[in-house]
Amino acid sequence: MALTAVITGTRKTGHREPAWFKSLFARYVAPWATPDNRFYLGGARGIDSLSLLWLAGNSQSPLTVVVPGAVAQQPAEARQAIERCRDRIEGIVELAADELRTPAFHARNRYMVDRADIVIGFPLEGSAGASGTWQTINYAASRGKPRLIVPV
């Protein structure tokens, strides 16, 4: 049975080497990364971009990138990841928010969770509560959706 997964996570990834994240995704994302299972990714820097690059290179899962405004408004790192993976991205959803502030990011997170069966969250280790990652995880919980939480 196919499922749809959301990957959410911290934008702060400079405290670890890229190889560490590749190993992390191989362990916690790979079991879900089948050709039948779809992924929604937030299109931001950090975990969003790293997981997009990993999934594009290590799976045949359909990938959908969701941004609160337009791809052109995303940080350079995120735009570059999207461009590198363009041939593997099945869809890009631009929610056309007027302002890229917290409400727009929360709307993007809700859009993804509302279409998902599971949320895989990679919050910054030691943080809790107020981050966008935790907002997404908590929103999924309020909707009764399973969550896999892997602190980074």
Image: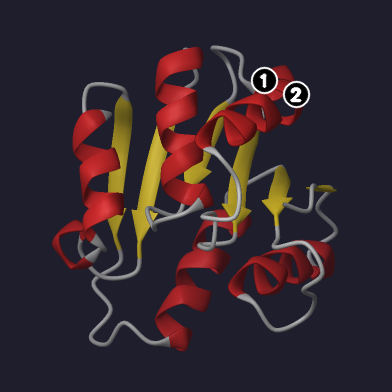
SS for callout 1: helix
The reply to whether the C-beta atoms of the residues labelled 2 and 1 are less than 8 Å apart is: yes
Q: Nearer the viewer, residue 20 or 45?
A: 20
Q: Dividing the picture into quarters, in which one does residue 71 lie? A: bottom left
Q: Is residue 63 visible to us here? A: yes
Q: Position of residue 98 (x, y in %)?
A: 23, 85
Q: Residue at x 70, y 52 (%)?
A: 121
Q: Dot 2: within a 10 Å radius of its alpha carbon, few (fewer than 14), some, or many (20 or more) residues?
A: few
Disc 2 is placed on an element classified as helix
The answer to whether 43 is drawn above or below residue 38 in the figure is below
- Residue 124 x, y percent position in the rendering: 70, 63
At 41% from the left and 45% from the top, the residue drawn is 49
Q: Residue at x 47, y 54 (%)?
A: 46
In three-dimensional space, the C-alpha distance between marks 2 and 1, rounded to whole angstroms, equals 6 Å
Which amino acid is tagged 1? Ala
Residue 30: mark in rendering: 1
Residue 27: give its label: 2
* Nearer-the-camera pick, 33 or 140: 33
Amino acid residing under circle 2: Arg
User: Where in the figure is residue 146, as x and y percent of width and height?
Assistant: 84, 48
